[in-house]
Image (spheres, rainbow, N blue to C red):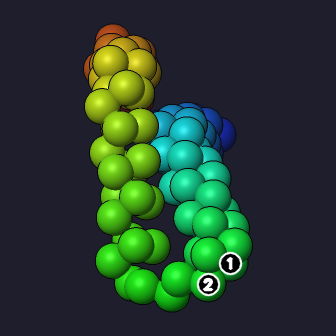
Amino acid sequence: MTPDTVVQLMRDTLMTAFWLAAPLLAIGFIAGIAVSLVQIATSMQDNAFSTIPRLLAFLGGLLLLMPWMLQRTMTYAHALLGNLGRYAR
């Protein structure tokens, strides 16, 4: 295996991990901003009020994005294992 092959393999792995995590991180970020704005507007500084909506938004996003995430992971695994002979050289 050449160094270029290793670099490309690691790049593909990291990009796949990035694209799988990015939508959930964006949902968490938007939910956090929304909850913070509501807390500022109502002057309510309760920890449960800030945590539960974020967790629910994250869970909802995870449930909605799970088929896409599984498809993306399966595509990556199929491409990786389909070219396994190329990596063994």
Secondary structure at numbered mark 2: loop
Left-right relation of 69 to 36: left
Question: Do residues under tags 1 and 2 come within 8 Å of each other at their CB atoms?
Answer: yes
Q: Residue at x 33, y 64 (%)?
A: 52
The alpha-carbon separation of the residues under discs 1 and 2 comes to: 5 Å
* Residue 70 in view, yes or no: yes
Occupied quadrant, residue 36: bottom right
Left-right relation of 82 to 24: left
Residue topped by disc 1: 40
* Percent x, y of residue 41: 69, 73
Q: Residue at x 40, y 58 (%)?
A: 53
Q: Residue at x 51, y 87 (%)?
A: 45
Residue topped by disc 2: 43
Foreground of the two, 74 or 44: 44
Which quarter shows the C terminus?
A: top left
65 relative to 45, above or below: above
